[in-house]
Amino acid sequence: MNLCDVRFVKKLMAKYGTGTKKGFGQNFLINPSVPEGIAEESYSYHKSKCDNKKCGVLEIGPGIGSLTNELCGCYDTVLAIEIDKTLIPILDETLSEHNNVTVINDDFLKLDLNELISKYFDGSSISVCANLPYYITTPIIMKLLESARDENGKSKLCSITVMVQKEVASRLCANETDKDYGAITASINYYGRVTHLFDVGPENFLPAPKVTSSVIRIELYDEPIYKTKSEKMLFKVIEGAFAQRRKTMVNSLSSVITNIPKSRIGEIIEKLGFDINIRGERLSIKDFCALADEFYGEIN
Ligand code: SAM
C-alpha cells in the first residue's frame, strides 16, 4: 500500500465515496520522502530530549494516514484527530497493520487537550507532529502552547513539529527587527524556540496548494525562560504593541491598556530604557515580560 501514490490515493477515496475537501484544508502528501522526513525530524528531536520513557505523539489531521503511518513506526503511541468522518473508514484500512494508533473523529479545536493527554498518553513523553490544515494553523498552535500545561505552568509537550504555509513559518521564526516579527512570534517565543527545518513545494501535495510550505519545530521550554507576574497582562501587552503597527508603541498600547494613562505608559517605556518612539517589533519576549510586569504593578 503506497499512501503517496496519486493513483492509489484517488482509487482509495473513490472506493469510500469521498474526495479531498478544500473546506477542511485537505492537501495530502504524495511524495513519500516528505512524511518520512517530518516523522524523522519529530522523533529524533523527541528522543534526544526524552529518553528512557514511553514516547507518544499527537497528530492533528491524519488525512488518509501517510504521516500517521510513519509516526506509528517511530513512536510507542500515536493519537490522531481527524475532523472529516468520511476519512475514518479509510484510516481503518490504511493503518490496520499498526496496533499503537487511535483515531478520533472530532474537531481538534473543540476537544479538551488535557483530557486527551491523560486518557491516551498517561506516563508518556509527548510531542505533536502534523501537516496542519492551513485555515486554522494559528488557533491550533496557540491551543497546544496555552493549554497543554500542568498546574505549575510546566509544559506537557516536548516539541511541536508541523508543516505550515511558508509565509506563516517566516512569521513564527522571525527575529526582532525582521519585518515578519509580530504578536504571534513574540507569543511563541514565550513558550519555546522555533526552528525552520525545510521547505516543501506545491508539487508534493494532492491537490497542489498555491503556496510553498515549510516544516518547523517548536522546542518547548519546560517552563518559560522569561517569567512574568501575569500571563494575562503579558499577552495583552503583546497584542497591544502590534495592534496598530504603523503607530509607535505608546499609541498602539494605549488603545488596549485603557486603565493606565497614555502619558504614564510613555514614562514606563522610558523607565525601562527604551526610546519613547520605539515600535513593538523591536522588543524581545524578555522586554515584553519586563513591560508587562511594570504595567501589572501599576494596576495592582
Ligand atoms: N496528514 C495528511 C497528509 O499530510 O497528507 C493530511 C494533511 S491535510 C493538510 C490537513 C488534515 O487536517 C485533513 O485531513 C483535514 O481533514 C484535517 N482537519 C481539518 N480541520 C481539522 C480540525 N479542526 N480538527 C482535526 N482535523 C482537521
Image: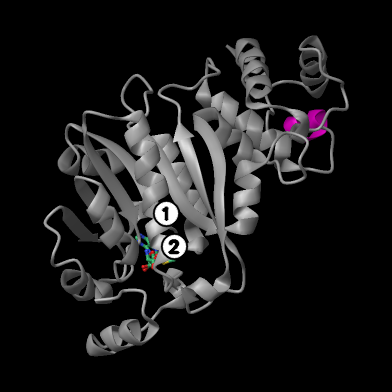
Q: Quadrant of ligand 1?
A: bottom left
Task: From the top left corner, tell me how far across and down residue 111 is, in percent.
Answer: 29, 50
**Image quadrant assignment for residue 96:** bottom left
Determine which residue is flagged by label 1. 38
Determine which residue is flagged by label 2. 34
* Residue type (three-letter) at the residue carrying disc 1: Ile
Q: Main secondary structure of the magenta part?
A: helix
Is residue 11 visible in the rendered structure shown here?
yes
**135 in the magenta segment:** no
Q: Is mark 1 within 8 Å of ligand 1?
A: no
**Image quadrant assignment for residue 201:** bottom right
Above or below for 284 versus 147: above
Residue range of the region highlighted in magenta in the rendering: 249-254
**Image quadrant assignment for residue 118:** top left
- In this image, 263 relative to 230: left or right? right
Which residue is at 53% across, 57% downward?
Answer: 164
Q: How many marks?
A: 2
- Image quadrant where one finds the C terminus: top right
| Of 4 and 150, the residue lying toward us | 4
Task: From the top left corner, tell me how far across and down residue 61 is, in percent.
Answer: 35, 61
Task: From the top left corner, tell me how far across and down residue 168 is, in percent.
Answer: 61, 53
Which residue is at 16% across, 70% downward?
Answer: 92
Q: Is mark 2 within 8 Å of ligand 1?
A: yes
Marks 2 and 1 in Cβ contact (< 8 Å): yes
Which residue is at 30% across, 43% downward?
Answer: 113
* Residue type (three-letter) at the residue carrying disc 2: Val
| Of 292 and 25, the residue lying toward us | 25
- In this image, 93 relative to 295: left or right? left
| Of 198 and 173, the residue lying toward us | 198
